Image: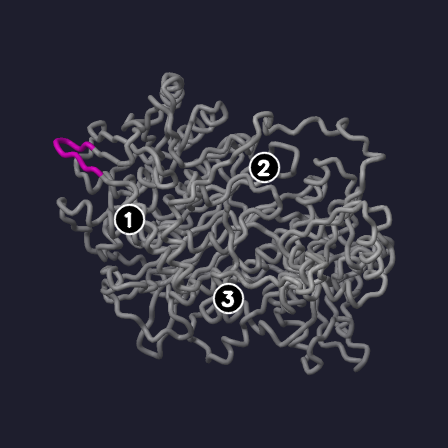
Amino acid sequence: TTVEPFNGAATGSGGEIRDRMAGGKGSLPLAGTAVYMTSYPRLDTIRPWEQKVAPRPWLYHAPDEILIKASNGASDFGNKFGQPLINGSLFTFEQEENEKTFAYDKVVMLAGGVGFANARDSQKDTPEPGDVIVVLGGDNYRIGMGGGAVSSVATGEYGQGTELNAVQRANPEMQKRVANAIRAMVEAPENPIVSIHDHGAGGHLNSLSELVEDTGAVIKVGKLPLGDPTLSFKEILGNESQERMGLVIGKKDLPLLEETAARERAPLYKVGEVRSDHRLVVEDDNENVCPVDLKLEYLFGKPPRTVLRDTHQSVLFEAVSYDQTKFEEYLIQVLRLEAVASKDWLTNKVDRSVTGRVAMQQCAGPLQLPLNNLGVMALDYRGKKGVATALGHAPAAALADAGAGSRLAVAEALTNLVWAPLEGGLSGVALSANWMWPARNPGENARLYAAVKALSDFAVELGVPVPTGKDSLSMTQKYGKEKVVYAPGTVIVSAAGPVTDVRKSVSPVAKPVAGSRLYYVDFSQSGFALAGSSLAQVLNRVGQETPDVADAACFKRSFNALQQLIAGDKILAGHDVSAGGLITTLLEMNFARNEGGMEIVTDVFAEKDIICLMFSEKPAVVIQVSAADREEVEKTLQQAKADYYPVGKVIAEPVLEIKHQKETFRFDIARYRDIWYETSYLFDLIQTRDDAAHSRRKNYKRQDLQFHFRRNFSGKVKNITGLYNRKTAPVAAIIREKGVNGDREMAYALYLAGFRVKDVHMTDLIAGREDLSEVGMLVFVGGFSNSDVLGSAKGWAGAFLYNEKAKKALDDFYRREDTLSLGVCNGCQLMMELGLIYPEHPEKPKMQPNDSGKFESGFV
């Protein structure tokens, strides 16, 4: 991503999706997450904290370019694959102290996500001799050569030619084809897949060898598809061309996979066979050579344990100093910091609704502002169960105290996740830890050890497993032989858990409920320290004393107490305390609505320093509780021995009023919301046309999202099984082409409307398997057919116009007078291209690009 942001982030997102697809004997991806960490983007001159460290002669791209292009890449992949991106984070940082420069010149782009599998498929089977080894996906090119290796050293260590050669390229439409074929196997009554593995770092050699590590195999290199005939054996086997999956399948089941792959236009290649000799043999029958013949124990044997030696280095950063009279000035600066400021520039360009199963995404409240730190997906269309995901990190605090940084990362992920009713409460949660560290530099291995041990110990005390994660231990960037920039040692924690009822998930938006009260629940058991905080950052400090979690048992009890209250519908709204501190939490609970505010009283706290109290990022949450439920809420928290404090109430006036000792601070919510939104506007100026960015800033707070339903609409699905006679109901056909992704949600909507629904791929029409003669309604669904390479839906239109059977089926359908048709998104563009909109008009309408010049995602 540092070298080529768009494709780096896009292939990261695609690779992570394939990781999930390869779970067990095949799993189904549901939703994605993304984290971006760079050095300061220097968007404007009114951001003094960006001025202390001088900009470097960036090796490839400036931080603002990286943030725009990387987020475009991650968004584009999900948009085209059909995976909603429902959760994320952004962090920028630079600090020069103790004769070292800490900054994310080597950037972090973390792609994550959640999905699910059938329990029967959770474990891979052992391949049997004679089973077929299959590769699904695209051709081999001289792409991503040594990608995994080059990313494992400091950026700038190799020449630019080598680093650019290692960049991979993304093709989400190909991955969608492959995913559809795998999904068909997973959803079959009997899944025929024996084992499955994604292609990532190391290419075929890594993927195919891991498929057969318990048995052995022969691979025919001539069967691997070549997009470039000049590739050497090494390049064929080691290139990291994307969107490929390796499978083992029995010979008797191969025809089913071949037929399915052909229908989905997913290229399938039979490249080898499983053997029992525990060797990996790669043969080329054309040249009668054997470029690889290795015992598997050489590849997967137990290598000698690496011993890393390091010395603990005592590094003391300058303490955070501040002026008590500058509360408002500090707040304005903190609200402009990327980690705190509005992320609308990220969410307005990424699909957060595709699949129709998104129960909670980033945007909340009447103004639909990105304030949710929790993402929730339903598992299906008819049930209440789902899966929740959330993120946490604290790299600035980790500079001051590596162990505390790890605990704070876990705490943030969990206080973001707590708002969904989880099956089993905290015991139902699993974590993933991704480590980005400037290892192999003096003192950093020792810090990494302390950080990993702290996270491990804390997770054990909480009773939460950490079954997965990755690492990148070369987080430095070199400028010649003199200048080295070290990324702050970072762990990003992703938390996920099964949800009992997605409808009960709690949002951070305060509700206009008269008499309701606000409570502060302390998850930390530590003081209001400022090291590693956003305030410290805008003051160009790291600090010395960080917040921490002093009592894991108390954290666990508090978490489960909130879970009990959420399950009982006792919490109206809730928000964690993290980036920006308590003051940001309180403001954000009011930003997404135009009416109402809060009145806060601080005399319940022992801390009397208003700056520490309001800007410390120690783990805690704020909850809103109705007057009727106050007694039960307090009783539940008392029984859990949780530390909680009544801190205020919701009021009608749109201000945040804080009474502290003898002072009263009043913050106009609309004014501070505009300040908070300003950074997003500056990013939008870069990624959209100026007039579109101006219009968005002007109108974002004027468009309350309101739903108006007929009086007899209850919002409940009737028992549709007996509502319609399915045998005589009209037939609706979902028409899809490779690359579209709105088919499943549309099929269910049509089913609810009373149709019998058919899935019709363009390959069915082209081959003549389907002629639409029994179909009463056509729906051309949304997505990105042919990845929009030829223009929106132009390739899809060509598939109708230039294939005789498909054209005849369509023409015959429209000659009938008893039919309906609907085009959504890409399907609407298709109908335009086919001349189906106002066909009687001499001039056919044409669809123009969006005025903003980019993909738009938002309610209208």
Disc with the residue nearer the chain's start (1 vs 2): 2
Where is residue 360 drawn, in percent x and y? 51, 40
Given the image, on which type of amino acid does mark 1 rest? Ser
- Disc 2 marks which residue? 386
- Disc 1 marks which residue? 533
Label 3 element class: helix
- Please state which of the two labelled residues, at mark 1 or mark 2, is closer to the viewer: 2
Report whether 73 appears left or right of 661.
right
Disc with the residue nearer the chain's start (2 vs 3): 3
Report the magenta residues as a range: 659-666
| 625 versus 81 height, above or below | above
Label 2 element class: strand
Given the image, on which type of amino acid does mark 3 rest? Phe
- Please state which of the two labelled residues, at mark 3 or mark 1, is closer to the viewer: 3
Front residue of 659/716: it is 716
Majority SS type along the magenta span: strand
- Mark 1 closeness class: few <14, some 14–19, many ≥20 residues within 10 Å: many
Q: Quadrant of residue 685?
A: bottom left
Given the image, on which type of amino acid does mark 2 rest? Gly
Report whether 661 appears left or right of 514.
left
Label 1–label 2 contact, CB within 8 A: no
Instruction: Give yes or no for residue 402 being in the magenta stretch.
Output: no
Q: CA distance from mark 1 to mark 2?
A: 33 Å
Q: CA distance from mark 3 to mark 1?
A: 30 Å
